[in-house]
Image (cartoon, rainbow, N blue to C red):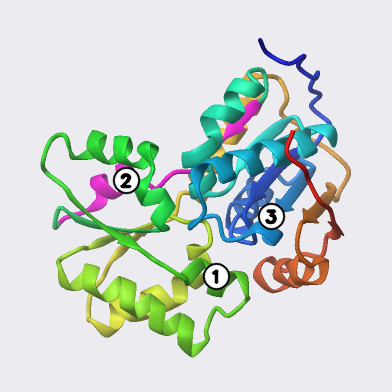
Amino acid sequence: MHLPQPEYDASTPIGIFDSGVGGLSILRHIHALLPHEALMYFADSGFAPYGEKPESVIVERALSIADFLIQQNCKALVVACNTATAAAIAALRAKYPSLIVVGVEPGLKPAAAQTKSNIVGVLATERTLASDKFQALHEQHTASGDVRFLQQACIGLADQIEKGELSSIQTVSLVRRYVEPLITQGADTLVLGCTHYPFVLEQIVAVTKSLHKEVNIIDTGDAVARHLQRLLEQAHLYHPSAPKQAPLTAFTTGSHSSLRSAFKVLLGLSPEVREVSVAPT
C-alpha cells in the first residue's frame, strides 16, 4: 500500500542528492538550464563514499534523504549519483509514485553512437558496474555485438574528488592508472559513469593527449537536466519565471564548511549550507 502522496506545486524546489559533492556536476547543468527553479542540494558526505557500500545500505540512505527533501516540499527529486540510481531508484519510485524522480546512468547509448573504433571505456565505481541496472544496460547496448565496452572500476577516485584534491599527485596518478589502459586497448570514447568524474575532466583529457589520442568524453549531465525539464513541463510543474535570484539551499551530513567550499570552488556559488542528520524511516 502506498503512503499518502504530498501535493506538488510549481513554485516549490527541486531536490538533488548525491553521496557527496559529485552531484554538483548535475546541479550545474540544472541551474544553467532552469535558472528560475529553486534548488535544494543534499550531500550525504557523512556516509560517503557509496561505491563500496552494500546495496541495502544505499537504498536505506536514499529513502531517508528523499523523505527529508520531501518534507522540505520538493516537487521533484534528482538522484545525482550513479551508484544510488542503480541501487535505489526503483525503491524511490515505488514509495513515491506521484513524485518526479530522475536518475543518472552511464551514457552507453550516446557513446555507442559516437565511437568509431567500436571500443568504449566506462569509468565508474565498483558498485555501479556490479549493479543489476548497469548489467542490464550493458547487455542492451551490446546485443548487436558491434560495440565493446571496457569496464574500469575507479577505486578511490571519487574519494579524492570529495576531498577537493582535483589536481594532486595522487589524483593525477589514479586518473592515469584508470584511463591509460582503456586508451591503449583502443577506446576512442570514454563514459564518465560517476557524477564526481566531470570535475577531473581536465586530468582525463591530459592523459589522452599524452597518448596522442583524440577521445570523445560522455558526460550525461546536460541530458539529465533536459529530461527533468520535460517531465516538469508534462506535470505542469515547470516554473519559467521567478525572482531574479531563485533560491539555492544545501544540506549535508558532513561538514558545512567543506560543502560551502566545494560550491565555491567547483561552481562559483555560495548557497546557505546546513548540517543535518537523517534517520532510517
Distance, label 2 to label 3, CA atoms, is 27 Å
Badge 3: residue crowd in 10 Å (few <14, some 14–19, many ≥20): many
Type of amino acid at the residue the image marks with label 3: Asp
Mark 1 residue element: helix
Q: Nearer the viewer, residue 111 or 5?
A: 5
| Residue 44 circle label | 3
Going from N to C along the chain, the mark reached first, 1 or 3, is 3
Q: Nearer the viewer, residue 37 or 101?
A: 101
Distance, label 1 to label 2, CA atoms, is 24 Å
The residue stretch that appears in magenta: 100-116
Q: Quadrant of residue 138?
A: top left
- Image position of 231 (left or right of 237): left
Type of amino acid at the residue the image marks with label 1: Asp
Going from N to C along the chain, the mark reached first, 2 or 3, is 3
Disc 1: which residue: 159
Type of amino acid at the residue the image marks with label 2: Leu
Give the tally of numbered discs. 3
| Residue 108 circle label | 2
Q: Position of residue 275 (x, y in %)?
A: 84, 58
Badge 2: residue crowd in 10 Å (few <14, some 14–19, many ≥20): many
Residue at (57, 28) in percent of width and height:
91
Quadrant of the image containing the N terminus: top right
Going from N to C along the chain, the mark reached first, 1 or 2, is 2
